[in-house]
Image (cartoon, helix red, strand yellow):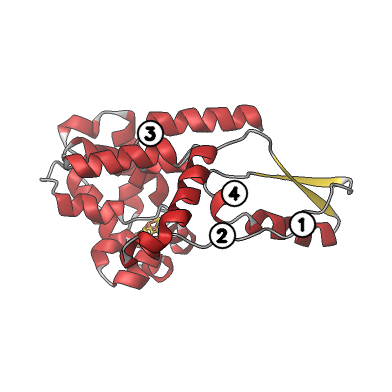
Amino acid sequence: MQTRLADFIRDSAEGREAEAILRKCVHCGFCTATCPTYQVLGDDLDSPRGRIYLMKRALEGAPVTERTRLHLDRCLTCRACETTCPSGVRYGRLVDIGRAVVEARTRRGPLERLSRAALAFGLPRTRLFAAALALGRIARPLLPASLKQKIPPRVEAAPWPPPRHERKMLVLAGCVQPALAPSINAAAARVLDRVGISLIEVPGAGCCGAIRFHLNYQEAGRDDMRALIDAW
Ligand code: SF4
Ligand code: SF4
């Protein structure tokens, strides 16, 4: 795809990287087959191809609107699209660059900024999130239906087998997962135990950084990643 990046980014490291990625996209749309948001919403602007086009326009200096930002916000950054792209487009890296540009050129309302700041602060803090979730479960009967359905019931994890195998595998406990779905890692531990591998959670590893990075608190996300590397 031909690109002509705007002066504000053309000669930066991010600009050169984004341009190289954009030029690989041939707009074939194969990636739409594995994009969950496109599958659910059916709008090309909520597909990787559409988002790539929106980011290209933003990087070329076209006006950026709240709708542009909304379509990028809806991206889960799951990178499933990369698995079906015949051209090897590094969508995940492009969306990191594109989000930072779009964020800098738009302004969110005060409520949205507050809720995003609260998410960036609270979600990576495992104990704080667990306490907030516990309070939410207590208050659940009093909440309106729209909020009620967002609070999942408590799930008890089945026993985690003791470490007894020579072969070991490390796993992250994660930030929200211990409170929301503790059964996931425990189930993986039991499956691996059956095939002779002991699964061990890395103590004190905390959040992998994705939450804050993808909320566009990129420096804070990098701090989480550095702490994670040290813990590993
Ligand atoms: S599959 Fe790859 S080349 Fe085709 S539209 Fe999607 S990102 Fe672009
Ligand atoms: S990262 Fe996931 S949600 Fe975002 S465009 Fe790719 S497949 Fe879709």
Label 3 to label 4: alpha-carbon separation: 24 Å
Secondary element at tag 3:
helix
Q: Earlier in the sequence, mark 3 or mark 4?
A: 4
Secondary element at tag 4:
helix
Q: Earlier in the sequence, mark 1 or mark 2?
A: 2
Label 3 to label 2: alpha-carbon separation: 32 Å
Q: Earlier in the sequence, mark 1 or mark 3?
A: 1
Q: Which residue is mark 3?
A: 218
Label 4 to label 2: alpha-carbon separation: 11 Å
Ligand 1 visible in quadrant: bottom left
In the image, which is nearer the foreground, mark 4 or mark 2? 2
Q: Position of residue 152 (x, y in %)?
A: 48, 62
User: Which residue is at 45% across, 45% downward?
Assistant: 132
Secondary element at tag 2:
loop
The amino acid sitting under disc 1 is Pro
In the image, which is nearer the foreground, mark 3 or mark 4? 4
Relative to 104, 26 lies left or right: right
Front one among 109 and 129: 129
Q: Earlier in the sequence, mark 4 or mark 2?
A: 2
In the image, which is nearer the foreground, mark 3 or mark 2? 2
Badge 1 density bin: few <14, some 14–19, many ≥20, Cα 10 Å: few
Label 4 to label 1: alpha-carbon separation: 14 Å
Q: Which residue is mark 2?
A: 154
Label 1 CB, ligand 2: below 8 Å?
no
User: Which residue is at 47% across, 55% downward?
Assistant: 138
For the N terminus, the quadrant is bottom left
Q: Which residue is mark 1?
A: 159
Relative to 225, 197 lies left or right: right
